[in-house]
Image (tube, rainbow, N blue to C red):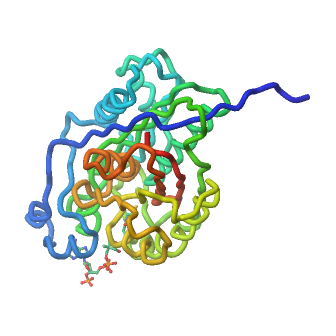
Amino acid sequence: MSLNIDRRSAAILGFGAYRPSTVVTNDDLAQRVDTDDDWITSRVGIKERRFADESETIVSMAVEASRDALANAGITAEDLDLVILATCTAVSQLPSAAPQVAHILGAKAPGAYDVNAACAGFCYALSQASNAIQVGDATTALVVGVEKLTDWVDPQDRSTCIIFADGAGAAIVGRSETQQIGPAVWGSAGDRPEAIIVRDRDSLMEMDGRAVFRWATTEVRPQIEKICTAAGITMRDIDVFVPHQANLRITTNMLRALDFREDVVVAKDIEYSGNTSAASIPLAIQRLVADGLARSGDKVLTIGFGAGLTYAGQIFVMP
Ligand SMILES: CC(C)(COP(=O)(O)OP(=O)(O)OC[C@H]1O[C@@H](n2cnc3c(N)ncnc32)[C@H](O)[C@@H]1OP(=O)(O)O)[C@@H](O)C(=O)NCCC(=O)NCCS
């Protein structure tokens, strides 16, 4: 027996962002730990980042980014029937944050859950939203990437406190005439949990920076060609490249071995936002849109990668 199910198509309808108001420069950090602006800009490419204050929580930042995305998509929260929130810095394990975000927005009891795939979380969540719309589980989905990494990073650890930061980015995914979101290519390396780890609820983040750098530039980079193949296009067709904003040196290193066109737009939001894990890709896209560098109809390739180790990426057409 087979079920009689129509397959639908999905597209991103709009993006939104929330950046905490406190700007922290490299000089600010140099007052706290033994580092300097030259070291930080040359090693990771970050000029400044945003730190959330006590009133800026995972839920409140997600709500603000989502309101922005809803406005940009031209819909209201009442249209949402699915909310997926990607984060690895939730304050508590129970309950998840997505139902609260949905409630505050005024959505009518949508399906709501959190995803933890660290810095790859937004790409995992985007794929789940696209799939849910294609099979008919949902008609309109909100996907949020949100992090408050400053809760989990040791402010005295100069190898991590200069990299990680806070913020939220969101996307609305809805029905479309044609499929505008490609299949996700994803994977993991569970033999390296210690590369980026918070050991238990009383611990802060530890990172083996060299191991992460090596993995991203050797094992993650080849996935980019697979993402194009999965979507039935080539790297030369890509207009905008939005890798997880982990570290500008990782992006530069990846680009050396990729066959993008010379005029491909490359996201560099890391310079002003730092590494915001699951929030980094939608935040970077929002900045490209605001700067007029990503336009409607552009083919965008995203790839998230980080703790787990996990990665995921896909191509989508800009709304
Ligand atoms: C973190 C990273 C910049 C460190 O650079 P590195 O060249 O590997 O540096 P090392 O860790 O070997 O440390 C080199 C020296 O710099 C020092 N150092 C580390 N952080 C520093 C800082 N903020 N300022 C000044 N010196 C610093 C180290 O203590 C070490 O000093 P030592 O030689 O006297 O012991 C680099 O490994 C990296 O970019 N990794 C990827 C991290 C990442 O992207 N994580 C997010 C993934 S989602």
Instruction: Tell me the residue at 51%/65% (across/down).
Output: 236
Q: How many circles with numbers are drawn on the protein?
A: 0
Foreground residue among 240 and 186: 240
Instruction: Tell me the residue at 23%/68% (across/down).
Output: 158
Quarter of the image where the C terminus is located: top left
Horizontal relation, residue 193 to residue 107: left or right? right
Location of residue 236 with respect to 278 vertically, above or below: below
Instruction: Tell me the residue at 56%/32% (across/down).
Output: 176
Residue 78, picture quadrant? top left
| Residue 250 horizontal/vertical position (percent) | 38, 71
Instruction: Tell me the residue at 58%/67% (across/down).
Output: 191
Foreground residue among 120 and 255: 255
Residue 74, picture quadrant? top left
Foreground residue among 259 and 166: 259
| Residue 30 horizontal/vertical position (percent) | 11, 67
Location of residue 25 with respect to 296 vertically, above or below: below
Location of residue 46 with respect to 42 vertically, above or below: above
| Residue 59 horizontal/vertical position (percent) | 33, 32
| Residue 177 horizontal/vertical position (percent) | 59, 32
Quarter of the image where the N terminus is located: top right
Foreground residue among 52 and 241: 241
Residue 143, picture quadrant? top left
Task: State ligand 1's quadrant.
Answer: bottom left
